[in-house]
Image (cartoon, rainbow, N blue to C red):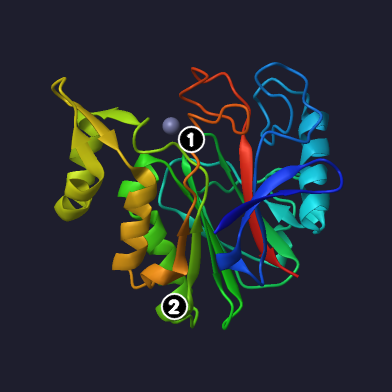
């Protein structure tokens, strides 16, 4: 179950009891220092209109709220790929406090005191944890990532490192809901190429030809289950970023003029 948590410093984030034992949180837009109408107030990405110093201040506020060292956070540029990066201690700060050549949309963490963040504003953040093997994963799944099956890729990487799928727990965070996410034929075609069964399960044709509603959260749940993660180990946040614009940034609802949230995971 997802629950909102208000930290002492005013940051509000969501946590899932499914990920107990891992330090984690899905940020909202509440509790930061950004003051522009569209970034107010916990924008966690560069290049959205805030000074870089404000963004870094917000990152430190989120880290303080979650109780980890911000300097250990990794969040490289995302490229809507299925690239998953194995995060080592040498990468701490990459993409946040220091420049990086790396880009990708998923992380595997095997070491303590190292944290990774997915950046979203409608796309689906998926955080995973194996409390037996002590391995975490984080995935950025927009439609391209979802239908390139990046969530399955993360499960496979965890298994290659010794995890059993029955031990993997996953939390699918706040993202645009299935009733609000209209897509065109291109997305449907990409999904069918990945898996016709998956596409049939998560697309609903609209009256207008070539338009569909797409449920990305459900798609990622199905992908995880198909990869072997037990259904009872998967928690899905029902909140829709497109509907809850006081609480979250939404790319669609804002016409692209918006801040960015982070979904963070790691171990102490
Ligand atoms: Zn909605």
Front position in the image: 18 or 110: 18
Tag shown at residue 122: 1
Q: In the figure, 208 relative to 61: above or below? A: above
* Ligand 1, image quadrant it occupies: top left
Name the front one of labels 1 and 2.
Answer: 1
Quadrant of the frame with the C terminus: bottom right
Q: Left or right: 45 with respect to 244? A: right
Residue 55, image x, y percentages: 76, 33
- At 21% from the left edge and 50% from the top edge, which residue is drawn? 201
Using a 10 Å C-alpha cutoff, classify the residue at mark 2 as few (fewer than 14 neighbours), some (14 to 19) or many (20 or more). few
Front position in the image: 18 or 211: 18
Residue 177, image x, y percentages: 40, 38
Q: Secondary structure at mark 2?
A: helix
The total number of labels drawn is: 2
Q: In the figure, 197 relative to 259: above or below? A: below
Instruction: Report the Cα–Cα distance between label 1 and label 2.
Output: 30 Å
Residue 93, image x, y percentages: 74, 52
Tag shown at residue 160: 2
- At 45% from the left edge and 70% from the top edge, which residue is drawn? 233
């Amino acid at each position: 179950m997802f629950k909102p948590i208000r930290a002492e410093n005013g940051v509000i984030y969501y946590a899932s009891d499914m990920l107990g034992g891992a330090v984690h949180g899905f940020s909202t837009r509440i509790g930061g220092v950004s003051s522009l109408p569209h970034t107010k107030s916990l924008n966690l990405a560069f290049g959205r209109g805030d000074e870089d110093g404000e963004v870094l201040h917000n990152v430190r506020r989120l880290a303080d709220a979650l109780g980890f060292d911000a300097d250990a956070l990794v969040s490289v540029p995302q490229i809507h790929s299925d690239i998953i990066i194995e995060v080592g201690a040498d990468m701490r700060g990459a993409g946040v406090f220091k420049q990086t050549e790396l880009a990708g949309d998923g992380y595997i963490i095997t070491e303590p005191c190292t944290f990774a963040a997915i950046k979203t504003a409608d796309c689906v953040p998926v955080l995973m944890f194996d409390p037996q093997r002590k391995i975490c994963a984080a995935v950025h799944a927009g439609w391209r990532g979802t239908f390139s099956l990046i969530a399955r890729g993360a499960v496979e990487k965890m298994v290659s490192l010794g995890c059993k799928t029955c031990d993997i727990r996953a939390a699918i965070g706040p993202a645009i809901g299935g009733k609000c996410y209209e897509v065109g034929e291109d997305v449907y075609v990409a999904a069918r190429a990945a898996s016709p069964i998956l596409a049939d399960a998560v697309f609903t044709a609209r009256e207008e030809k070539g338009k569909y509603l797409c449920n990305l959260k459900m798609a990622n749940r199905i992908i995880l289950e198909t990869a072997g993660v037990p259904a009872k180990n998967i928690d899905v946040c029902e909140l829709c970023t497109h509907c809850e614009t006081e609480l979250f940034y939404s790319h669609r609802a804002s016409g692209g003029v918006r801040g960015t949230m982070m979904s963070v995971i790691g171990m102490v």
